[in-house]
Amino acid sequence: MNIVHYSDIDGKHFEGDSVQGITGRVLIGEDDGAPNFVMRLFEVEPGGYSPQHSHDWEHEIFIHQGEGAVFFEGKSYPVRAGSAIFVPPNKEHQIRNTGDGTLTFLCLIPAGPPEL
């Protein structure tokens, strides 16, 4: 068993042409001995967004704080704290912060792909 506060985990900040204002942390992953899943936490600054992308694995997302939008297959869907999102494999998607505060979400993926 391992218990850690998320703020004690170093974050990786992402900035570039396709991604803005995101910090990610691996809360539970391979280093913790988790053989099947990876739990990650992302914080998106106001106006920030993830890249539009797709990949071979599914993931599950839970919006913990803030307001945003999920771009999925050409449409934008509003989300807010408490929203749960399932993204199937090989579907283009993106998350944007549309609010005034930080958008915080948990993202679960299977073990194997890059953790961050």
Image (cartoon, rainbow, N blue to C red):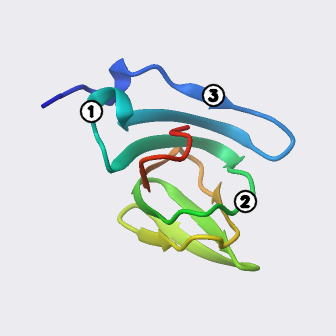
Where is residue 13 shown, x and y percent of the image? 63, 28
Residue furthest left in the image: 1
Q: Earlier in the sequence, mark 3 or mark 1?
A: 3
Give the alpha-carbon distance from disc 1 to disc 2, as whole Å.
28 Å
Disc 3 marks which amino acid? Answer: His
Name the spot of residue 4 as percent of width and height, x first: 23, 25
Please state if 16 lies on the left or on the right of 92 as rendered. right
Q: Any mark on residue 13, and which?
A: 3
Q: Which residue is mark 2?
A: 53
Q: Which mark is residue 33?
A: 1
Q: Amino acid at mark 2?
A: His
Helix, strand or loop at label 3? It is strand
Q: Residue at x 75, y 33 (%)?
A: 15
Specify whether 93 is left or right of 109. right
SS for dot 1: loop
Which callout, 3 or 1, points to the residue nearer the camera?
1
Q: Residue at x 68, y 37 (%)?
A: 21
> For mark 2, does the 10 Å Cα neighbourhood hold few (<14), some (14 to 19), or many (20 or more) residues?
few
Q: Position of residue 87 (x, y in %)?
A: 53, 70
